[in-house]
Amino acid sequence: MAISRRAAMTMALAAPLTMRAAQATPAAESVLSDIIQRTEEQAAAFMAGDMMRWASLIRLDDDFTLMQPFGGPASHGFDGSPERLAELARFFRNGGGKLEVEKSYSSDELIVLVMIERQHGEVGGLPDQDWSLRVTQVYRRHGSDWRLAHRHADPLVGKIGLEQAAVLARGA
């Protein structure tokens, strides 16, 4: 079977990229490990209501987007004012958590973590309970720093049936 010249050139150009992506350097593995550790610390600090620590662990990118676990449209940017952080600290209290990283992807410019945040806490005045979330986070490199550019979180850690999914899809 003959391969077109264009297909052959595409394969030749893609091969080094595929090989480079498959060979993680110790430095890249160290960066990924650091991001995972700080992400876990950040999730635990958030559920504990320690917003000053949360804000110090990983900076949010200027064009940060959030798909909130409570649903609704994506939010853009983040109000990191002392007043907003104090409001969040009152809403999320006395909790903690751990990460289960399902998959990670990294390149020179982006890191993607697909994970379960196994967490608990008092949220919105409710008693301490499980608040585990399915989460995808995208980090973007800025010089030697990595910033959180996107977070998508939902509470569907446990499987639900079609009827329950349909109720949620209708917004009920």
Image (cartoon, helix red, strand yellow):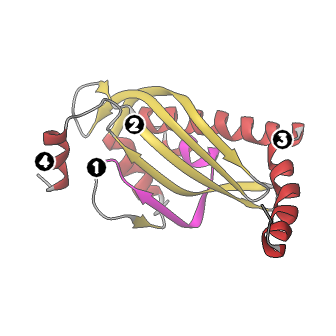
Name of the residue lying farthest toward the front? 1
Q: Is disc 4 in contact with disc 3, using a CB cutoff of under 8 Å?
A: no
Judging by the rendered image, the residue that carries numbered circle 2 is 133
Check disc 4 and give the amino acid type: Val
To which quarter of the image does residue 169 belong? bottom left
Residue at the spot 84% in from the left edge and 67% down from the top edge: 8
Please rate how many residues cluster around mark 4, counting C-alpha atoms within 10 Å: few if below 14, some from 14 to 19, many from 20.
few
Measure how far apart labels 1 and 4 are at the Cα level: 14 Å
- The residue labelled by disc 3 is 24
Q: Is residue 24 left or right of residue 128?
A: right
Looking at the image, is mark 4 or mark 2 nearer the viewer? 4
The magenta-colored residue range is: 53-70
State which mark lies toward you, 2 or 3.
3
Q: Are marks 4 and 2 in contact (CB under 8 Å)?
A: no
Residue to which mark 4 is pinned: 167
Q: What type is the residue that disc 2 sits on?
A: Leu
Identify the secondary structure beneath mark 3.
loop
